[in-house]
Image: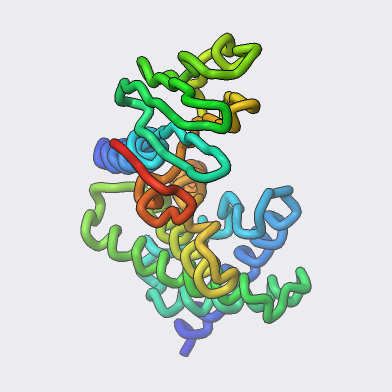
Amino acid sequence: MKTTIIDWLIIVIIGIILLFFLFSDKISKNKDDKKKFLLISSDNFNLKYDISQDTELIIAGKLGNSKIKIKKREAFFADSPCKNKLCVHSKPIADEKQINACLPNGILIKIIAENYKDNKKSENIDATTK
Amino acid sequence: MQLQNNKNKQLVFWIIVSVLIYITENFIPRPLPWLKIGFANIVFLILLKNEKFKISDLFVILIFRNLIAAFVTGAFLVPIILVNTLSCAISIIAMKLFFIIFNDKISFLSVSVIGALVNMGLQVSIGSLIIFKNFLLLNMLQYFLLYAYFSGIITGIISNKFSKKIYC
């Protein structure tokens, strides 16, 4: 049997559908499922902030208030009452699972990328802002 | 009577051919039991175009092929054989429908791809939901379908070449 033009048309259409099926999954994961948040933890609370929105936060710790900034999808300690200021001198964090902490003041910041739908279900988070 | 005997002989011949191809293909290393190129399906593709054979004859070949191959390979009553038989039967129906719809406007190439996709889709779905009882395999369905797509193209091209020798 000879291969016809309809054969190739069908094969190309199926190929395009399959490729779309293959890559749409990855696109949707990047767009929706992998939304990044900044998790701020201390002994008493866990707070979650949308990393895409620039903001300045004053968080009360053991020694006093730490100033944490979210700027251009990066989070960092802008100021802290600790002695050595290692947390302030540390590089900003932006990627999933990156951590920075001010141990004397008992504050930890971490980037989490989790399923957007699951955020509401999370019971360990005290507050979320968007 | 003579005609019936001839047809039975042809059926036995095609059962033997498909069993031989099926068993030989089992020796080709593959990552998962159902990830075959599907050379044995070339028999069904070619017979679908043969007016002497009805779709019920193809089911007879399929059942005998899977039973004999299961005995020979020691996989008798293994759930995968049952899943394979069911998905193959449905893919034969899909291929026949495709041939009926497009008639002579298409060759074995596109029909083979359709059959391979239906077969793989059903095998993964049934295997995932009934045998493994989880969605792990279904989450990878797109990769299995891509594999089926290319294996369908390979068997389609081979079927086209074979049919030239058989029908011409």
Looking at the image, how many numbered discs can be counted on the residues? 0
Residue beneath the point at 46% across and 61% down: B119
In the image, farthest residue toward the bottom? B1
Residue beneath the point at 58% across and 13% down: A90
**Horizontal arrangement in the rendering, residue B59 relative to residue B22 (left or right):** left
Find residue A89 and report its image quarter. top right
B2 up-or-down from B52: above or below: below
**Horizontal arrangement in the rendering, residue B60 relative to residue A118 (left or right):** right
Of B110 and A115, nearer the camera is A115
B10 up-or-down from B146: above or below: below
Which corner quadrant holds the N terminus of chain A? top left
Which corner quadrant holds the C terminus of chain A? top left
**Horizontal arrangement in the rendering, residue A18 relative to residue B162 (left or right):** left
Of B93 and B3, nearer the camera is B93
Residue beneath the point at 51% across and 79% down: B60
- Measuring from the top left, give residue A124's x and y in whole percent: 49, 52
A11 up-or-down from B126: above or below: above
User: Can the viewer see residue B142?
Assistant: yes
User: Can the viewer see residue A2?
Assistant: no
Of B13 and A62, nearer the camera is A62
- Measuring from the top left, give residue A59's x and y in whole percent: 44, 30
Residue beneath the point at 58% across and 76% down: B82
- Measuring from the top left, give residue A110's x and y in whole percent: 53, 31
A91 up-or-down from B163: above or below: above
Of A24 and A59, nearer the camera is A59
- Measuring from the top left, give residue B92's x and y in whole percent: 41, 66
In the image, farthest residue toward the top? A89
**Horizontal arrangement in the rendering, residue B62 relative to residue B51 (left or right):** right
